[in-house]
Image: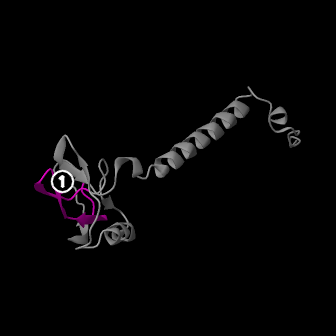
Amino acid sequence: SSEVRSIARTPGTGAESTDRRPVEFEAAIVYEYHFDGERHEGSRIYPAMSSIFSDSKLAQELVDRFPAGAEVSVYVDPDRPASAALIRGDTVPIMGFVVVGVMILLVLGIFAVVGLVVSGVVDPSKLFGGSPPPADN
């Protein structure tokens, strides 16, 4: 079966209470597969990632890739046949992590340059090849 389920989060014991309840969406897919002559049932989509999204469209796109009743490839750990996933580990989208990492480095670099200029360690005229604007009197 394939469906998108909405999940409401609410604070638990010891958590600060709020009136807002963010909703998340789970791509819920259950599949059957056979390995070494044994029947198994699985629900894991990615081997090491959750299938819960903050956007229902992303969850729906994933569900649409694996419609109910369709034949799909299931990737099985031969040492643990009950452990399987619909999307192989090497195809898990890591581009998002790379982009976020680059953005963090870029922001840190900008802060470092600004910090050096403000502290007087670096002369801005030498940094950008121009002369600084004249000081107001």
Q: How many residues crowd mark 1 within 10 Å: few (<14), some (14–19), many (20+)? A: few
Left-right relation of 62 to 131? left
Q: What residue do we see at 41% from left, 51% from top?
A: 91
Query: Is any atom of residue 1 visible in this view?
Result: yes
Residue 1 drawn in magenta: no
Q: Nearer the viewer, residue 51 or 39?
A: 39
Q: Which residues are magenta?
A: 16-44
Percent position (x, y) of residue 71? Answer: 26, 68
Q: Amino acid at mark 1?
A: Gly
Q: Is residue 29 above or below residue 84?
A: below
Q: How is the image coloured?
A: one colour
Residue occupying the far front of the picture: 37
Query: Is any atom of residue 20 visible in this view?
Result: no
Quadrant in which the N terminus is drawn: bottom left
Percent position (x, y) of residue 54? Answer: 36, 63
Task: Check disc 1 and report its element: helix, strand or loop.
Answer: loop
Percent position (x, y) of residue 2? Answer: 24, 71
- Residue 27, quarter of the rendered image: bottom left
Left-right relation of 102 to 76? right
Quadrant in which the C terminus is drawn: top right
Percent position (x, y) of residue 107? Answer: 60, 43
Residue wearing tag 1: 12
Q: What residue do we see at 80% from left, 34% from top?
A: 127
